[in-house]
Amino acid sequence: MTRPLIVVTGPGKKLKVGWWATKFILWLCGARSCYLSPTQPELLQAVDGVVIGGGDDIDPEHYGESGDAGATYDAARDSLEIAMIKAALQAGVPLLGICRGAQLINVVLKGSLFQDIRPLRRKTPNKNSAFVIKKAYLQASSQVAAILGKEVIGINSLHSQAVNKLSSELQVAAVDGDDFVQAFEHQTKPFIIGVQWHPEYLPYYSCQRNLFHALVAAVSNQSKKLLPEHYNQYHIK
């Protein structure tokens, strides 16, 4: 059988560590992948699912705020990924947001973010780490808990922004020790999931691989496609 094709978005940097890690874990789980970034923004073929990757903070103008918490914003990437999220929602294909990607799904669905959570942390570390550094506590009845097969998991942390107001279309699936949202899922649609941590950097944990296995299973069990024209109608070139 032909492996399903999943598009992964990310930065236009030379060292695309997040993309390489995501491509590897998707391949382990049975999918092919292609990459979109500000330096290669064209979707050239139909895809079965979408991963919005991690990276720079999201400009607060996208959720109706102003300010600058010492962040570097990437306007071209914001535009590209907002277009891709809207296209995925229109096409009805499975959608996974990782860290920044989860935050942006929430923003597109009319939620908001904390611009800088570092002063607000009390029980979780401010230190960034690609390795497990804290815990996420999952809602037992959530889709994410069923996928991961656990109610408490170890997670890494590479972010200073986080969900503040959660979209009315979404529901919390996990929080950390400071009650910041660590995972959410759509209330009615079958596979729209966001996780605040980076599971692609933790492939040696079976529960983290399960998230990508579930994504691949979701795209394999449906006939919908995201076509270039779905994306192009939203993408400002």
Image (spheres, helix red, strand yellow):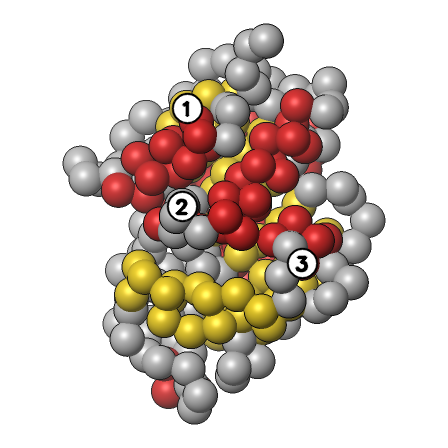
Q: Which badge, 2 or 3, comes first in the chain's sequence?
A: 3
The residue that mark 1 highlights is: 34
SS of the residue under disc 3: helix
Q: Residue pushed farthest right?
A: 188
Where is residue 193? Give x, y as percent.
62, 50
User: Mark 1, residues whose alpha carbon is within 10 Å: few (<14), some, or many (≥20)?
Assistant: some
Q: Is residue 130 above or below residue 201?
A: below
Disc 2 to disc 3, how far (Cα)? 17 Å
Disc 2 to disc 1, how far (Cα)? 19 Å
Q: Which badge, 2 or 1, comes first in the chain's sequence?
A: 1
Instruction: Name the foreground residue: 142 vs 188.
Output: 142
Instruction: Name the foreground residue: 8 vs 227.
Output: 8
SS of the residue under disc 2: loop
Mark nearer the viewer, 2 or 1: 2
Q: Residue pushed farthest left?
A: 14
The residue that mark 3 highlights is: 145
Disc 3 to disc 1, how far (Cα)? 28 Å
Q: Is residue 98 above or below residue 133?
A: above
Mark on residue 105?
A: none
Q: Which badge, 3 or 1, comes first in the chain's sequence?
A: 1
Residue at 53% from the left image edge and 52% from the top image edge: 207
Amino acid type, label 2 = Pro
Where is residue 102? Give x, y as percent.
53, 54
**Is residue 185 something one can see in this rendering?**
no
Q: Is residue 237 above or below residue 59?
A: above
Q: Quadrant of residue 174 in the image?
A: bottom right
